[in-house]
Image (tube, rainbow, N blue to C red):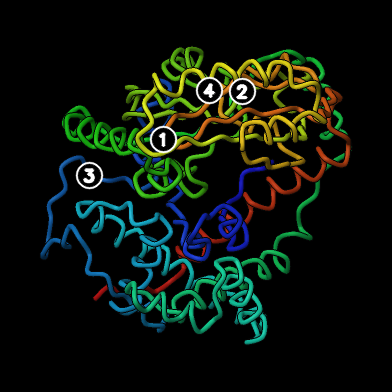
Amino acid sequence: MAKQFRVTFARALAGAAALAFAAATAAVAQDAQQSQDAQQAPAGTPNSTSALNLPQNPQLFGSAMPAVVKATAIVNGDIITQTDIDQRVALTVLGNEGKVSPDQIEQLRQQVLRNLIDETLEIQAAKEDKIEVKEKDIQKTVLRVAGQVKKTPDQLAAYLAANGSSLKSLRRQIEGEISWQRLQADKIDDSVSVGDDEVKAVLARMNASKGTEEYRVGEIFLAATPDTMPQAQATAQNILDQLKNGASFQAYARQYSVASTAAVGGDLGWVRTEQLPPQLAAVLQQMGPGTISNPIPVPGGLSILAVQDTRKILTADPRDAILSLKQISINFPKGTTREAAEPVLARFADAAHNVGGCGGADKLAADFHGEMVQSDQIKMRDLPPVLQDIMIPMQVGQATQPFGNIDEGVRVLVICGRDDPDATAPSYDQIYNQMNEDRVNSRAQRYLRDLRRDAIIDFR
C-alpha cells in the first residue's frame, strides 16, 4: 500500500488494541531530515543555504530564544493553551498504553505542540475553503470510537477525564482529520493525474524484478554530528532497550525519528537492498521478519531498522496462505510440574499426530477434556514465526505438534482448509490507484508545508 502522509483517525482506530480511540493521536513529524541530506550530498553539490548568502561567523543580537519553547501558541489568532497540550499528551500516552517514560514526556510535549499547530492550520484552511465539519459528522465518529472500546460516549468522556485528557481534545482531533481529508479532496485529489505509460512502466519493472527479495522495513533515524554522536548513541541504545521490552516501534519512530517517514511510524514500505545506503543494506540482508537491528552508523547519524516482513516480487509466498483452523487446548492444575505433565503431553502429541483430519479434532478435545476453537480466514503470516515454519509444509487435515507451556496451557492447531496465494502481478487498476495515492500524499505534504510557511505563529 502507498505510504500515508497523515495517519487518519480511522486507520489509527483499526490498529489500536484496548485503547483504540487514543491511537488517533499519532504524531505528524516534520519533513526535514536535518543534517542527513547535507552530509550525504555528493561533492560539488550546491549547498542548500547558498541562496541565503549567510556569513560564516555571524554576530548575534538580542536575547536567544529558549531551547524549549513553552507549550502555548497563537496560530493566526487561534490560541493553543497549556490545557490543550496537556490533554493531547495524555491522549497520546493512553494510545501508547502508558509506555512513555518520564524523560520522554518533554520531547513528546513539543511534538504534540507541533501537531496541534498543524491541526489548527488545517482547520483554518478548510474554513477558508468554505468546508464545514458539522456536529453530526464529529458525533458519528465519537460513537464509532466509543463502540470500538465498548463504552458509551459518556463513559468514554469519563474515562478520558480520569486519565488527564478530555472528550473535547478527542473531538478536536476528529475535526482536524475530517477537515484535512475534505480539504485534500477539494484542493488536491482532482489535480493529480497518472499517465497510462507510467502505469505500464511500473508493471514492466515489476515483471523484470520477479523473484527479487523485498523487505517491509521501519526506520528510526537520529541525526548526529561528530560532536553529538555520543549523545545520539546513548539515545539510540535507550530506544533499543525499550523496543526489546515490548515498546511500540511506530510510537518511538513518531517521537524520535527525524526522517520524513516519522509521520507514518517510520514505515519505509517494501524496499529492496539496492534502494538503501550500503550500511543499511548490509545489515538488512542478515535480518529476518520480526527482528530489530542495533543502531547502525550512517552518514548524518544513526538508524535503527525493524523488519516487519519479507517477500519475493511476483513469487508465490506460502506465508500468504489463508487458513481455516481448529485449536485444541488442554490445561493442567496449578503447580503441575513438567515431569508430572510429561505422560499426558506424550499421549496428546501422539493423538494429535493421528488426529485423522479436521473431523477428528472434536474427539481429540473430548478425549483430553480440552477446549476447541474454530477460526477461519487466518493469514499464515499473522501466526508466530515458529508456527509458520511448522505449518508451511503441512497439508489439510494435519495437526501441529503441541506447543505452549504448563502454566498457561498446551495446544495444537489442526488445518481444516488452506487457500494458497496467487503469484500474479497486480492489476493495472491497483497500480494506478497506488500511484495516484502516492501523488496525492506528496501534494498534501507540500500543501501543509506552505500553510506552515505562511502562518503567523506567536509562541508564549
Sequence-wise, which precedes: disc 1 or disc 3?
A: 3
Residue type beneath disc 4: Val
Residue type beneath disc 1: Asp
Instruction: Give residue 344's mark.
Output: 4
Sequence-wise, which precedes: disc 3 or disc 4?
A: 3
Q: Nearer the viewer, mark 1 or mark 4?
A: 4
Instruction: Give residue 407's mark.
Output: 1
Residue type beneath disc 2: Thr
Q: Nearer the viewer, mark 3 or mark 4?
A: 4
366 and 119: which one is in front?
A: 366
181 and 439: which one is in front?
A: 181
In which quarter of the view is residue 138 placed? bottom right
**Looking at the picture, does residue 192 appear above or below residue 166?**
above
Mark 4 → mark 2, Cα distance in angstroms = 38 Å
Is residue 383 visible to us here? yes
The extreme bottom residue here reads 135
Would residue 345 appear left or right of 115 to someone viewing this image? right
- Which residue is denoted by mark 3 in the rendering? 55
Q: Nearer the viewer, mark 4 or mark 2?
A: 4
Badge 2: residue crowd in 10 Å (few <14, some 14–19, many ≥20)? many
Mark 3 → mark 4, Cα distance in angstroms = 80 Å
Q: Position of residue 262 (x, y in %)?
A: 45, 45
Sequence-wise, which precedes: disc 4 or disc 2?
A: 2
Instruction: Give residue 253's mark.
Output: none
Viewport quadrant of the N terminus: top right
Q: Position of residue 406 (x, y in %)?
A: 44, 30
Q: Nearer the viewer, mark 3 or mark 2?
A: 2
The residue at 77%/15% (across/down) is: 210
- Which residue is denoted by mark 2 in the rendering? 310
Q: Secondary structure at mark 4?
A: helix
